[in-house]
Image (cartoon, rainbow, N blue to C red):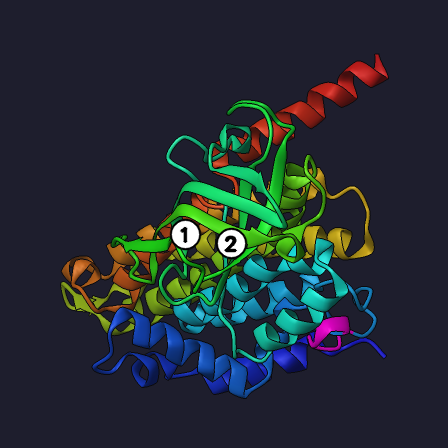
Amino acid sequence: MTIDLEALCSEVDSAARGVEAAIGAGATEDERSRRALAFLAERGWLGWAVPERWGGAAAAGLCAPDEVSVRALCALRRTLARREGLLDLALVEQGLGSYAIARAGSDALKEAVLPEVAAGRRVAAFALTEDEAGSDLSRVATRATRREGGWSVAGAKTYITNAGIADEYTLLARAEGEPGDRDGLVMLRIPATALGLEVRRFEVMAPHPIGEVVLNDVLVPDEDQLGEVGEGMDLALSVLARFRTSVAAAAVGFAQRALEESVSRLQKREQFGRPLSTQQGLRFDLAEMDTRIRAAELLVDLAAELVDEGGDATQAVARAKLFATETASWVCDRAVQHHGGLGVRRGTVVERLFREVRALRIYEGTSEVQKLILAKELLDRSREDS
């Protein structure tokens, strides 16, 4: 029997209403993140970021038991983002940070780590990006040097979400060759307690735990190697391929909330003796916001289904990521405009949405990268047809 995603999302939406105040009152950035994680864990929702076979939720009828269902993940991220961005972030980071283990870790490592991640007892993080390696992961320079029984890792990762609260990192390092070589990379699992691992936090416009992870000759035993040397790039890209569509889904959730806030504001706010909702230009805005959001939602649904079914989803995912994140950014901007001065006041919902949605056009593949992917697919197909 296929899981009823509509019923699941209705349950999630009901529970998450008003949760912003519950997890945010008088709390630090780390405390808020841990509260968000606990909120999800108590309800069993973190399991949707981990394959059923290793302690995750039963995605019956949606995907194989050793996979994460993209359709379920997208439905949840859309619903959570609509209510509280930290809930969305806490959910997806558990998946991003552990999926490489599910794909390429030993059975012993999977059994030791993945059920703990699904239950929220361990916090995961995904460490790819470096100062000179963002969209181009072949530029990774963090060096893994062979030692008896494992590796010695030296280098630094940056813009790592959950840095400082994570219990472990799945990290891409260079075992062979030089930056710029696609080959020679390896994925490793590194506990946060490893000697020589240092975290340096910084702030971004949408507050959450993030920073640099510095590795000072950190020793990593062979049992924490994920896959073979030379497979690191493909493994890292497989993680992104599985989770990228869900970024688009989160964007849809942010946009839906922004539209709700605009509708409410325009109906309540009066100018020149009548509600703003009576002005034709603002009505046009609402109609276009609604149409673009629905189009983005359909693109996300199509891409998620293709990924779950194992088809060639390259174009579909790129379209969804590009259109949904750009649309959400535009919708949130319009919502700020509809609120006037209140829209830029710290603490209002639309001000928060405007900040939270901006990063989605950058991480897990920038909008420009998605355009390059789509153009390449179109040009390659044209050459094949000619």
Determine if the magenta segment contains residue 126.
no
User: Label 2: which residue?
Assistant: 126
Q: Is residue 329 left or right of residue 365?
A: left
104, 177: nearer the viewer: 177
78, 256: nearer the viewer: 78
Residue 329 visible within the image: no
User: Label 1: which residue?
Assistant: 160
291, 226: nearer the viewer: 226
Disc 2, disc 1: CB below 8 Å? yes
Q: Amino acid at mark 1?
A: Ile
Give the answer, above or below, for where 245 lies relative to 145.
below
Measuring from the top left, give residue 93's x and y in whole percent. Answer: 51, 62
- The mark nearer the N terminus, 2 or 1, is 2
The N terminus is located in which quarter?
Answer: bottom right
SS category of the residue bearing label 1: strand
Q: Amino acid at mark 2?
A: Phe
Q: Which residues are magenta?
A: 53-59
The C terminus is located in which quarter?
Answer: top right
Q: Main secondary structure of the magenta part?
A: loop
The residue drawn where x is 43% and y is 62% is 254
Determine if the magenta segment contains residue 55.
yes
Residue furthest to the top: 386
Q: Is residue 128 left or right of residue 6?
A: left
